[in-house]
Amino acid sequence: MENQKSSVMVIGGGIAGIQASLDLADMGVKVHLVEKQPGIGGHMAQLDKTFPTNDCAICILAPKMADCFGHPNINVMTYSEVKSVNGEAGDFNAVVTKKARYVKEEECTGCGECVEKCPTRIPDEFNMGLSNRKAIYLYFLQSVPRVVTIDRDNCLKLTRDRCGICQQVCDKDAIDYEQQDQDIQLNVGAIILATGFSLVDALPLQRYGYSKIQNVITSLEYERLSCASGPTGGHLERPSDHKTAKRLAFIQCVGSRDTRRSRYCSSVCCMHSTKEAILASEHEPGTQSFIFYTDLRASGKGFQEYIKRAQDEYGATYIKGRVGEINENWSGDPVVWYEDTEADEVKRMTVDLAILAPSLTPVRGSTELAQLLNIELDEYGFFKTDPYFSVETTRKGIFACGYCRDPMDIPESVTSASSAAARAMSVISNQ
Amino acid sequence: MTNESSTQQRSFTDLERDIISAGLCSQCGGCVSFCSANKLGALEISPDGTPRYSDEEKCLKCGLCYSICTQVNELDQELQEKFNWVPPMGRYERVTSARTTNHDIRSICTDGGVVTSLLVYMLDYNLIDGAVVSRFVGPFNRVPMIATDRADVLSSAGSDFSASTHVGVVGDEYSTYSPGAFALKDLTSSMRPARVALVGTPCQVHTIRKMQCLNIVPSDMVKYTIGLFCMENFAFPALAKREIEAKIGAGMDEIKKLNIKEELIVTLTNGESVHVPFDVVHEFARPACLKCTEFANDFADISAGGLGSPDGYTTVLIRTDAGQRIYQAALKLGYIEEQTYDSYREKADGQMGMVTKIIDFARQKADRSMGP
């Protein structure tokens, strides 16, 4: 390991982690990018478009993913998690566990023959369970590295000693059922956290019938439905009967700004729901969207204009009022009960599809990661940072950027990632 | 999780030896539907209804055909745990007696037309893309098919829903059975699989449920299973036709429909009906049926049959949440109606009567499987 101390470990391969890695690598710093999923891209890869410009999310992200993977200074470690970190700023010793893929990465060409012949069908988490994948799978269409992974919990060979078809059909002999998890030692000068968010746990969602009423979905499921490479090819087919949804209710603040769960504002939901209403109308002219909001927060550049366009050009109606309950009629339509605070009345509305904007919480596992890194969390579980040097955590040499630090949208995540890269640079160049 | 028999990998050759050659194949079509749906293409159904190699070279010896075979007990314990199974007829949430509200269905159905109506409801409301049923293609001839609209479903309505009731001509053999699970092989798609309801006998539902335990194709498409009560299916060579005609006292081509109640009820084209005790026809039952222990289709979402209900009504056992959902919706939306009772007491007695009869038949079938 040459230039050991002038290297940086970035934890999390979403847009923030990718940006921080690229910035550092371009400045000549060796970067180890650790991602727990089988491919990099993070949540941005799941989005259809980005607000307020309606640019295709993957079209912006995929070139950055490819740059990152091909960069001579970046060592992309997918399907890997940090196991321990010791040392101090300028000289951290980290152990990263590389989970067994049961596929020899250097042999796999990503041809997909094994995927084709795998008999197992399980919900595809990348598509938010709206479609199925195989037990051996490519994480998503544009995924890098283009290497398949065996899901050890669902592979019949690994769980029951049955099947073994993938090994039989692989021309490259790349399948290795005996592969073991592997611990890799890294010595780095600084660490950047870019672990992102998770959707709030099921409870606040269930209050609105989620998981019981098929046509109540989350906004991330909606993103997959409206995405051209998603499970419906971009057609807004509702789950229960695959009919095109033309009357939509967007329920804001599900779990957020709520004393029972997350008291903070998730900050991106007013805008992504507006974007989703616009997209629905673009896909299917005549679609009506009703956005039930607490306060409309449109404080970014061009955001207020975006909302105005949604109202004037795309048939979006904003209703100030919290939704109390959603139930279902016998045709499977969600019935939304809400208080219209302007009319001072309790009303109900029947829609084709209800889309919940769940509170976005620090990624699951943040507490354990903070313990392992010996850094503090704030009252909501985000990595605690300095008020004036907003990417610095409570431990010298460890920085945080993107949603794991504070609720923020994509442009802000990218900005904070560059900021973290610059601060990390200052630590390692002092060595 | 691993089953006791997981020590060695099996293949279809083992299935041939252990099950098919031993005359135990129930011809549910499960193994062939899996092999075809996964595009392995090593198996096919032979003219006598049993599976065979179509191209042994293509067999990858994955052994899954063995694991999912209805007649192999691998996965049975897991299945029983998953469904909280209890003897003798499995878990159920509710038992009712109901009938269709549709006159077209009522005129052709075996009992109350509930199964047909549930399928029509699911297709009308687009909850499924198709239903696997068996279709009447001529006197005593049924083939599995995928019904994708109301007309298809109606063409399949009638006695086949008490599956032990249809005589099909397959080659030179007569069979009351059609390998429903086999039809599924035609429906595969990569991104969003077709959503299917399967109407079948216990063995057909059983193989699908075993596939669902393993999460393998094509069982991912089967969103709802409607199981038929089943004592046995009949299969006999053409030569025995005359003998059977003598036993039921009518010519085969005079039979309009067959109905299972406490006895086999043969309705003739002239409107008469003949009651034949089961023991008279048992000798023509398929050997696999005589080894089968399951009468009440214990693992289906909804089980249905004529047993226990008055004429014109179907006895319905609602077993799962999915079953509850479609039954309740079909009821609320007016596709079916329940039998009315004068008092709560009468209703309770009626339900008790149905359950008692089903238990009685389930015990008889289980006892029979133990051999004489």
Image (cartoon, rainbow, N blue to C red):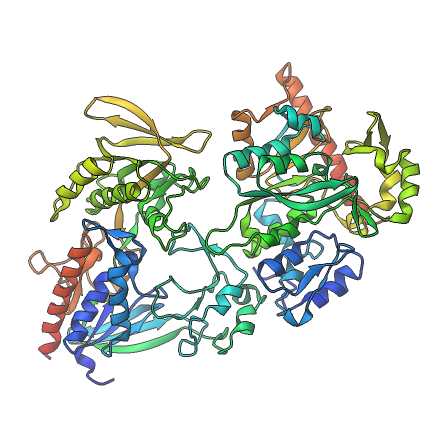
Quarter of the rendering containing residue A97? bottom left
**Residue at the outermost bottom position:** A2
Quarter of the rendering containing residue A63? bottom left
Residue name at image x 40 percent, y 43 percent? A237
Q: Considering the image in quadrants, where does the N terminus of chain B appear? A: bottom right
Residue A263 in sight from this viewpoint: no
Looking at this view, is A237 or A83 the one in front? A237
Q: Is residue A243 above or below residue B314?
A: below
Residue name at image x 80 percent, y 60 percent? B22
Q: Position of residue B52 (x, y in %)?
A: 73, 62
Looking at this view, is B181 or B141 the one in front? B141
**Residue at the outermost left position:** A388
**Residue at the outermost top position:** B342
Looking at this view, is A104 or B370 the one in front? A104
Q: Position of residue B103 (x, y in %)?
A: 64, 23
Side (left or right) of B136 relative to A347: right
Residue A282 in sight from this viewpoint: yes
Query: How many labels were placed on the picture?
Result: 0
Q: Position of residue B193 (x, y in %)?
A: 50, 51
Side (left or right) of A2 relative to A350: left
Q: Is residue B282 above or below residue A346?
A: below
Q: Position of residue B318 (x, y in %)?
A: 60, 35
Side (left or right) of A302 relative to A260: left
